[in-house]
Structure formats: C-alpha cells, structure tokens
Amino acid sequence: MTAAAPTPIPVPPGALTPPGAGKRTLAQALAWAGFALVLAWAWKGADIRPLDLARDSGNMAQFLKEFFPPDFREWRSYLREMIVTVHIAIWGTVLAIGCAVPFGLLSSSNIVPIWVYQPVRRLMDCCRAINEMVFAMLFIVAVGLGPFAGVMALWVHTTGTLAKLFSEAVEAIDPRPVEGVRATGASALEEIFYGVIPQVLPLWISYSLYRFESNVRSASVVGMVGAGGIGVILYEVIRGFEYAQTCAVMLIIITFVSSIDLVSARVRKLFI
Amino acid sequence: MTTGAALSVRELSKSFGAPKRALESVRLELAPGEMVALIGASGSGKSTLLRHVAGFVEGDRGSGAVRVGERVMQDDGRIAREIRALRADVGFVFQQFNLVGRLTVMTNVLMGQLPRIPAWRSLLGRFTHEEKAEAWRAMRSVGIENLAWQRASNLSGGQQQRVAIARALVQRARLILADEPIASLDPESARNVMEILARINREQGITVLVSLHQVQFARRYCPRTVALRLGEVVYDGPSADLDAGMLRGLYGAAVEEMLDGTETIDAVMNDPVVAEGLARAPATA
C-alpha cells in the first residue's frame, strides 16, 4: 500500500502480434509480385517507349511553343459552340434523370422481385458499358449530324450510370419508415413516394448534379465525331494544325468545365 | 365464429426455420373497446404476433384465421390479397416510431389518409383543407399541434411516438396495435404515451393491444393482460391477478427483465402508491 510500485501484469508471448502475421506477409509479397508481372506483361502491348520522350523532347518543345500565344480571334464562335455544349449536357442529363428514376427503382432489390431487377440491371449495364462517343456515332447515323445526336448519346449513357447510383441509394435506405407507411394501408406506389423517395432525394440530387458536371466534359468531346458543340471546332482546328486556336478552345473548355464543377459542388453540398 | 370481436386470432403458429416455433397455436380474442397488454420476455413472440395481425408476416400453413372486425387479414398461412386496403383499419405504433424523418410532422400524420384519397392526389401530395384539419385535430389530441411543420427527425422520442399515434388516429383505425411503444422512451415520455393510448381507448372506444415488457405498465393501464412465453399464451386474464410470484412461476429467471430488474419488486407490485411513484420517477435507478 506504500511506495511499492504495482507489479505490471506479464504479457503472454504472442499477444501483441495478430495471429497469422507471417502468413499475411507472404501473401502480400505474392500480391506485389503478381502486380509487377502484370505491369511487365502490359509494357509491350502498350508500346511504352520512355526513351523517346527524352529523344524527342526538342520536337515537343517546338510543338508546345506553337500553342502560345492562344489565338482568340474566333472567340465568338468558340463561345457560341461552348454554350451549345452546355445545352447538350443539360438536356442529356435531364432526360436521363427522368429515365433513371423508374429504372433505378426497378433495379433495387428491396423494391421489386429478382425477376424484375436482374433484367433491368443488365439493361442498364448495357447503357453504361458503351462510351458516349460510340453512342454519338450511332445516333449520328440515326438522327443526323448535330447536337441532337449528342443529347441522345448522353441520355442513354447517363441513364445507365444514374440508374445504378439511384438504385444503390434505394437499397441503402432505412426500411422502418417504409414499414410505417405500409402500416397505414398505403399502396405500393404510395409507399415509394412517401417512404422511399424522401429518404433518397438528397443523394439523388447530388448524383444528378455530379453527372451534369461530367456530362459537360463528355459533351465537349462528342462533337469530335460530329455530334455538335465545341468538339466540332476542336476537331477542325487540331486537324488543321491550328495549335494557337486549339489552345484557345481548350482554355474556354477548361474555364467552363471548372466553373460548372465549382458551382455544382457548392450546390451539392446544400443537399447532403 | 365471428362474435363481433375487434380482433380474433385462431390457432396461429409460426416457425422461422428454428426447431422451436416463434408462435405456438396462439388464440386470442379482443372485444371492441378493450385495452389489453401483451407481456413477455424478449423473444417470447410479442412482436411476431402483432406483425401477423397487421399482415406483415404470414403464419404457417394450417394456422387459423386472423380477423380484425369482420375482415380476414390472413388465413391458413396466406395473407389476404387486399391486405393493403385492410391495413387501413389497423393502426400500428412501432418501438422505433417508423416515421419518415425528412418529412414534416404534418405529412407524416397525413399519411393516415392515404388509403382514403384518390391515387393522383396522394402521389402529388395534395391534401384538402378538411384532410389537413383532421390531421391537425389528431395532432392536437396528442399535444403536438405546435410541432406540425417541424421535420419528424427533429423531435424527441416521446414526441415522435405521439406523431405515430396521431397517424393511427387519422387512419380512423378501430384497432391500434402498439409494439413496445415505450421501450425506447424515458420514463416520463413512456408514461405520457401510455396515458394517451389509454385516453383514446377510453374516449374514442378504439381497441388497443399494446406489447410491453414491464409488468408495472400493464397493471397500471390495461385491465387485461395476455402473457406469452416462447410463443405460447401462458396467461390471459385480469392484469390485477398477475403478481410477482405468478410471473416467476411462468417465466423463471427471465422474469427479472419484465420486473424492471428491481429486486424488491414484490413490494412494488403490491403497493399501488409505490408503483405510481416508480412510473413517474426520472430515469435514475
């Protein structure tokens, strides 16, 4: 009870290392080795030539010099096409949201039976798996050159992405409020409107805004295959070796995309 | 065999795959206007029984009918096809309140109207002045009319439970099932919620079946108690006849949970003044 220091409890051997630690180190080493093998295997296929970067550095410096100063003489047409690009993104996103709400609900395992959500999910996989550029080329054949083909391309692809994000939000809801709505004698649709949607709405809005941001980026390239917007101009100036103009177009795209990203990120924060 | 009962359950059994059944040939009949406590330790089947009555779960094949008034909710292990409409007659109050937290109290209460209004109006969220007035009166009767435009998630547990009761009132349910309505509440809110249930039972003649795991609340608010043990009805009679000794006989060691863990529970049970004091006491024990 006096000054005698309490004897510390002896720690049994091995208590301070997790069981199977040795095995884990070996597994980690094997995983790293496997990763290195994959990198080596892909080296050839991807035609990696780091020495060329050094050898051709003079050419590249010359090439870069041609970008500056940017040539803004045609800025009116750049701006006009950039705004068309935003228009394409707006309509592509809005139409996609309209489709993603029902498709998202139909691919949620807690809303519909398996024989509904599995086929719908596979359909959404198809929409998502194909890049917007590919859809744009297909829709140009269907509806002709111009922004409408771009809208269609974004619409289909974004429906696939948003439906997946929407259904993931739906599957993560708290089931108890839904049961509360069910207990009142509500119909299945009322259950979704009153019990499910209020819970997922903030996330849905946030995902939609995020997709709008990425669609502005995508819309600026679908034009390269002829689906309208700033991409058409970008393609022409690159093909014409007009690098000063290319630089101007790229600066306009960067300005638009970053400011839309900033604003949309701010708005998204309000909903979470 | 309909004798004008508010609720009748015939030979209801349920097994969830385990060897021991969750409900074992439960028979139960409630006369209109009764307030009945359903007691039992955790896992005795109280919630399971209530969820069968509301048609959330189906009984085993061979079970008898579950009737609310004249309407069959389920029979022979099959839930009535029009169950969604039938649920309108049964108010359900949950332990965790089950409100939609992001919606206002008003909207949560208005949900009780959903089965009565046309689908296009309910899906657009358009309620008439009269419907809102009815919701307001229900809120007033449970003392939450000043919280009408708050988000439900901003309310305390006791307030949320009163919203749930108001929702059941707007349903114009003739039977309210309350599944451990006070288990998540502090003693003061618990007493308040029980008072409200007793009052709507008394004043509006609504039949109430409330599951509790504290016997003192059953004795205080419900003239009749049904006790479950391992899915079987082991007692059905006046709450006043339930004493601690009898409960020990029925439940053995599991009884302490139902007696609120109080060692001197015999004294408490036998002394109404003490029982009342205990019910009113703040959450310090």
Image (cartoon, coloured by chain):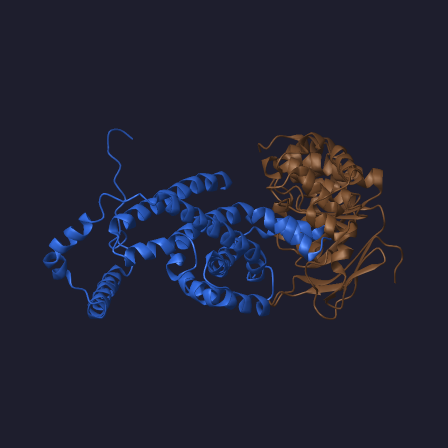
Chain colours: A blue, B brown
Residue, x 60% and y 66% (percent of image)?
Answer: A113
Q: Is residue A115 something one can see in this rendering?
A: yes
Residue B121: x percent and y percent?
A: 74, 48
Q: Quadrant of the N terminus of chain B?
A: bottom right
Q: Quadrant of the C terminus of chain B?
A: top right
Residue A163: x percent and y percent?
A: 52, 58
Callout count: 0
Q: Nearer the viewer, residue A76 or B97?
A: A76
Residue B227: x percent and y percent?
A: 72, 52
| Quadrant position of residue B79 | bottom right
Residue, x 57% and y 54% (percent of image)?
Answer: A98
Residue, x 62% and y 48% (percent of image)?
Answer: A177
Q: Nearer the viewer, residue B164 or A196?
A: A196
Q: Residue furthest front?
A: A73
| Quadrant position of residue A68 | top left
Q: Residue furthest left?
A: A55
Q: Nearer the viewer, residue A17 or B142?
A: B142
Residue B133: x percent and y percent?
A: 78, 36
Q: In the picture provided, is A247 more to the left or to the right than B109?
A: left
Q: Is residue B46 something one can see in this rendering?
A: no
Q: Nearer the viewer, residue A74 or B198?
A: A74
Q: In the picture provided, is B269 more to the left or to the right than B152?
A: right
